[in-house]
Image (cartoon, helix red, strand yellow):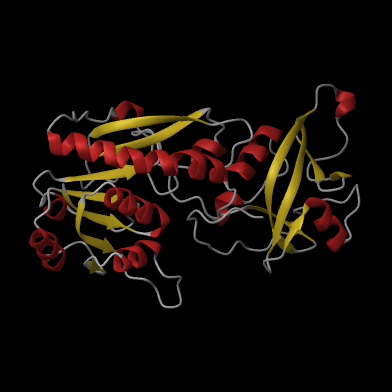
């Protein structure tokens, strides 16, 4: 089949490479323009290396985008991790229209941080959807879906990189074949089951040490690796990763007050919360220094009985895109 790919970043690159590897004809690639000083977009780099036409338009709305796509004369357009709005006048140009990837089981978790929120809310399952893009955000009819279990210690990173990313690439190939062959079905989303959540950024990622152990543990793993759930240590913002929870079974198991350091091990640090203790194995300081939990205690002179998060600075906005796990 002859296709156009619209997208960016590593997921877009992998989708491009998957179509090329099986012999499909990629007529052109649309990428968002890169900001000054930003890392090169992996999709753009891969497309240029393959000798493909690359379009970096500031918007997919208007005649410039429409004319570019129309001139490619493609069977299908494939949207892989697209942050630009694509209007109907654009997506309906290919002979078989356009398909789009979304990393949730639509209609649940529409929105830009759809991988974070199921983990943060403690869901046991999420998934991915290939659908027809409409002018409503993540609201188009569903072509296919894949379910993914969320384990009790899974993180945003493990759910995405181990499951939603590779399964998503395969699902785009599968959906493209079904659509071009006319063997697909399109199921309207059930609005009674729909939910929309916005970005998970710094304001949402701040830890409330008075929350329940499940809530704190889920927040940390749902923000790992990005944006990174955070607290303060002696006035310095610190992001916490690789958390484990330990439930308090009896009153006598309670070893400290919320936010209080109750243990420092060889690699970790334990913090008391409602219902138990959250153990932290890795952290990153505001300056970018990566430490173990025990290394944090050593660097900041922390001792059991000291409390975290008592002098929080105003949160600064940071991008909530998925980053590489802290190592």
In the image, what residue occupies the spot 87% across and 27% down?
253
Q: Is residue 110 visible?
A: no
Residue closest to the eye, 282 or 171: 171
- Residue 312's spot in the image, x, y percent? 70, 59
187 relative position to 12: left or right: left
Residue furthest to the bottom in view is 36
Looking at the image, is 47 positioned above or below residue 203?
below
In the image, what residue occupies the spot 21% across and 49% down?
24
Q: Is residue 197 visible?
A: yes
- Residue 230's spot in the image, x, y percent? 66, 53
In the image, what residue occupies the spot 42% across and 56% down?
10
The C terminus lies in quadrant: bottom right
Residue closest to the eye, 13 or 96: 13
- Residue 261's spot in the image, x, y percent? 85, 46
How many marks do you count on the picture? 0
Occupied quadrant, residue 63: bottom left
Residue furthest to the top in view is 250
- Residue 53's spot in the image, x, y percent? 21, 67
Residue closest to the eye, 268 or 315: 268
Looking at the image, is 81 positioned above or below residue 33?
above
268 relative position to 162: left or right: right
In the image, what residue occupies the spot 19% across and 30% down?
186
Residue closest to the eye, 249 or 53: 53
66 relative position to 261: left or right: left
317 relative position to 230: left or right: left
């Amino acid at each position: 089949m002859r296709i156009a790919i619209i997208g960016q970043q590593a997921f877009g690159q992998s989708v491009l490479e998957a179509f090329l590897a099986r012999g499909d004809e990629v007529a052109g690639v649309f990428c968002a323009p890169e900001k000054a000083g930003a890392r090169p977009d992996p999709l753009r780099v891969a497309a240029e290396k393959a000798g493909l036409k690359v379009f970096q338009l500031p918007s997919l709305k208007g005649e410039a985008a429409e004319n570019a796509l129309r001139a490619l004369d493609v069977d299908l357009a494939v949207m892989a991790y697209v942050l630009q709005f694509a209007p109907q006048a654009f997506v309906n140009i290919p002979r078989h229209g356009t398909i789009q990837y979304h990393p949730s089981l639509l209609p649940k978790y529409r929105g830009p941080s759809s991988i974070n929120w199921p983990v943060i809310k403690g869901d046991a399952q999420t998934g991915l959807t290939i659908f027809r893009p409409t002018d409503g955000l993540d609201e188009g009819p569903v072509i296919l879906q894949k379910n993914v279990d969320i384990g009790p210690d899974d993180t945003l990173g493990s759910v995405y990189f181990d499951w939603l990313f590779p399964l998503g690439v395969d699902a785009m190939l599968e959906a493209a074949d079904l659509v071009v062959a006319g063997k697909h079905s399109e199921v309207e989303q059930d609005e009674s089951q729909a939910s929309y959540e916005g970005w998970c950024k710094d304001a949402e990622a701040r830890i409330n040490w008075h929350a329940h152990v499940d809530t704190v543990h889920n927040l940390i793993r749902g923000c790992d690796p990005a944006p990174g759930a955070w607290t303060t240590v002696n006035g310095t913002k610190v992001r916490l990763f690789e958390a484990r929870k330990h439930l308090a079974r009896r009153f006598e198991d309670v070893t400290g007050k919320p936010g209080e350091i109750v243990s420092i091990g060889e690699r970790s640090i334990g913090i008391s919360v409602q219902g138990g203790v959250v153990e932290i194995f890795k952290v990153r300081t505001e300056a970018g220094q990566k430490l173990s939990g025990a290394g944090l205690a050593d660097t900041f002179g922390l001792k059991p009985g000291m409390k975290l998060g008592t002098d929080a600075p105003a949160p600064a906005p940071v991008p909530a895109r998925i980053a590489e796990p802290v190592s």
